[in-house]
Amino acid sequence: MSQKQRIDQQPAFVLHTYPWRETSLIVEIFSRDHGRVALVAKGARRPMSALRGVIMAFQPLLMDWSGGGEVKTLVRAEWRGGQPLLTGRALMCGYYLNELLVRLTAREDAHPALFDAYADALSQLGRGDVAPILRRFELTLLRELGYGVGLDIEGDSNRAVDPAQQYLYIIEKGPVRLAGDDEGLPGVSGQTLLDMAHGDFSRAETLFQSKALLRLLINHYLGGQPLQSRRVLKELQEL
C-alpha cells in the first residue's frame, strides 16, 4: 500500500486494542477485503473522542484508514449496528475466535469467506449451544488459511471415507484406517469425518470427536503455543 492510498468504508471488526502513547490506541482489526490490519487511532483515549465509543470488539464497523507501512492511520469508524453485545460464555468464545485470527492469520492477507464466517459466528454465539458454532468456525479457518483439512478421502488410499470405519487422523496426510496395532490411539469415526465435511455437528459423537481433532490441528499450526482464551474457557468449562 502506498503512503497516499486511502481505504474507505471497509467492513471490519476490532480484534484487539492496546494503548499507544498518552491518548491513542493501536487497533488490530479484521477487515473483509484487506484482512488483518494494524491501525493507530490517534486521540481515541481522550474522553471526548468520537472514536472512544465506537472502537469495540465484536461489533460490525465501517472503517476508513490511510498510509503505508505496517501500521496505518485510522481516519474514521462507524458502527453498522445489528449485533447484540456478547455477554457471559458467548463473550469468552468471541475472545477465543479473535485470538485464533490474531495468531493464525497474516497481516494484510484478505480472506473474505473467513470474514463472513467470523461475522456469522458472532451473530450466532448468543443464541444457544456454542460448541457447533466454534467447530464450524475452526474448520473454516483452517481451510481458508490453506491447511488442507482432508475429511472425506482416506489419506493413504484415496478411497472415500467409510462411515462404519474407525480412523487415525495424521496431520499433513489425513484420515488413515486404524490397524490392529493402533489400539489405544485417539481415533475418529468415519461418520464423524463425513459429518464434519458437511458442517453437520448434530450428532453428540461428532461434536465430541471433532472438538478433539480440531484442537489437535490448531495446536499443531500454533506450534504448540498455548491460547490464553482457551485457558480461561477451560477454567470456565466452556471449551
Image (cartoon, rainbow, N blue to C red):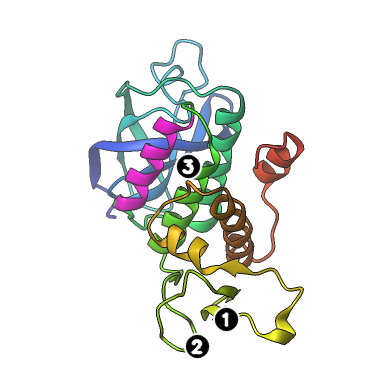
Left or right: where does residue 80 sit relative to residue 228?
Answer: left
The picture quadrant where one finds residue 95 is top right
Name the residue at the top extreme. Answer: 48
Q: Is residue 89 above or below residue 222?
A: above
Residue at disc 3, secondary structure = helix
* Crowdedness near tag 2: few (<14), some (14–19) or many (≥20) residues, C-alpha within 10 Å: few
The reply to whether residue 106 is visible in this rendering is: no
Residue at x-position 42% and y-position 32%: 124
* Majority secondary structure of magenta residues: helix
Q: Is residue 137 above or below residue 54?
A: below
- Residue 19 lies, in percent from the top left, at 58, 32
* Crowdedness near tag 1: few (<14), some (14–19) or many (≥20) residues, C-alpha within 10 Å: many
Mark 3 or 2: the one toward you? 2
* Crowdedness near tag 3: few (<14), some (14–19) or many (≥20) residues, C-alpha within 10 Å: many
Q: Amino acid at mark 3?
A: Ile
Mark 1 or 2: the one toward you? 1
Quarter of the image with the C terminus in it: top right
Q: Which residue is mark 3?
A: 133
Q: Which residue is mark 2?
A: 156
Q: Which residue is mark 1?
A: 177
Name the residue at the front extreme. Answer: 164
Callouts 1 and 2 close, C-beta under 8 Å: yes
Q: Is residue 32 magenta?
A: no
Q: CA distance from mark 1 to mark 2?
A: 9 Å
Residue at x-position 40% and y-position 78%: 160
Left or right: where does residue 158 sit relative to residue 19?
Answer: left
The disc, 3 or 2, on the residue closer to the chain's N-terminal end is: 3
Q: Is residue 118 magenta?
A: yes
Quarter of the image with the N terminus in it: bottom left
